[in-house]
Image: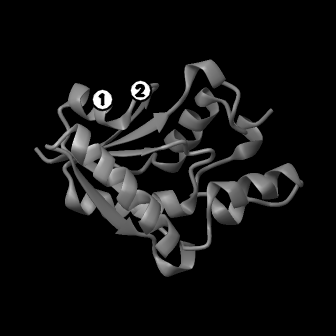
Amino acid sequence: MRKAIFPGSFDPFTVGHYDVLESALKLFDKVYIAIGHNTSKERSGYFTLPQRIEIIREATAGLKNIEICTYPDLTIDLCKKLKVNYIVRGLRTTTDFELESVIAQANKKMFPDVVSVFIPASQEYSFISSTVVRDVLIHGGDASLFLPKGVDLSKIKE
């Protein structure tokens, strides 16, 4: 079984993340959506960890072969723990590629068995980032255009 980890802060999980996840599911038998978090900075994000999990659950309700997990350590430590040799990273721009390449090289140095797989987001989602979505939310805008179908923030962010 070919398994991959799709790591991120997912604050929140956007249609861009969903797009990359759908592509990853065509390549892998199972994908772990791994929400990274720093236990010493639990409230550093816009959404709490339980809220992020709920958003991803709602967004991925119709998908099979995924599992949502959280981790406080390095992504490669999670790879070793789950016996996963692939890390999926979504790319929107060349800037993303440059940053992700550096991270992939560091991961490879620390865990030679790991392979980073870069999946470009579809063109219609290439401008969407969690930062943009948070900014829309903070200023009272309608972020539903940027969230996967099935996500109802009114139930989550109370």
Measured from the top left, where is residue 88 in percent x and y? Answer: 33, 54
**Residue flagged by tag 2: what amino acid is it?**
Asp
Residue found 46% across the figure and 48% down from its top: 60
Q: Residue furthest bottom?
A: 123
Disc tally is 2
For residue 29, which numbered disc appears in the image? none
Residue 65 in view:
no
Residue found 38% across the figure and 51% down from its top: 103
Q: Residues within 10 Å of mark 2 (few under 14, many from 20)?
A: few
Identify the residue position indicated by label 1 in the image.
77
**Which picture quadrant has residue 142?**
bottom right
Measured from the top left, where is residue 87 in percent x and y? Answer: 29, 49
Q: CA distance from mark 1 to mark 2?
A: 6 Å
Between 63 and 23, which is closer to the camera in this rendering?
Answer: 23
Residue found 46% across the figure and 45% down from its top: 61
Q: Looking at the rendering, in which quadrant would you find the C terminus?
A: top right
Residue found 10% across the figure and 44% down from its top: 1
Q: Residue furthest right?
A: 139
Identify the residue position indicated by label 2 in the image.
73
Between 113 and 17, which is closer to the camera in this rendering?
Answer: 113
Measured from the top left, where is residue 106 in percent x and y? Answer: 32, 47
Measured from the top left, where is residue 5 in percent x and y? Answer: 31, 43
Q: Secondary structure at mark 1?
A: helix
Q: Are marks 1 and 2 in contact (CB under 8 Å)?
A: yes
Residue 77 higher or lower than 127, as above or below: above
Q: Residue furthest top?
A: 40
Q: How is the image coloured?
A: one colour
Image position of 39 (left or right of 141): left
**Residue flagged by tag 1: what amino acid is it?**
Asp
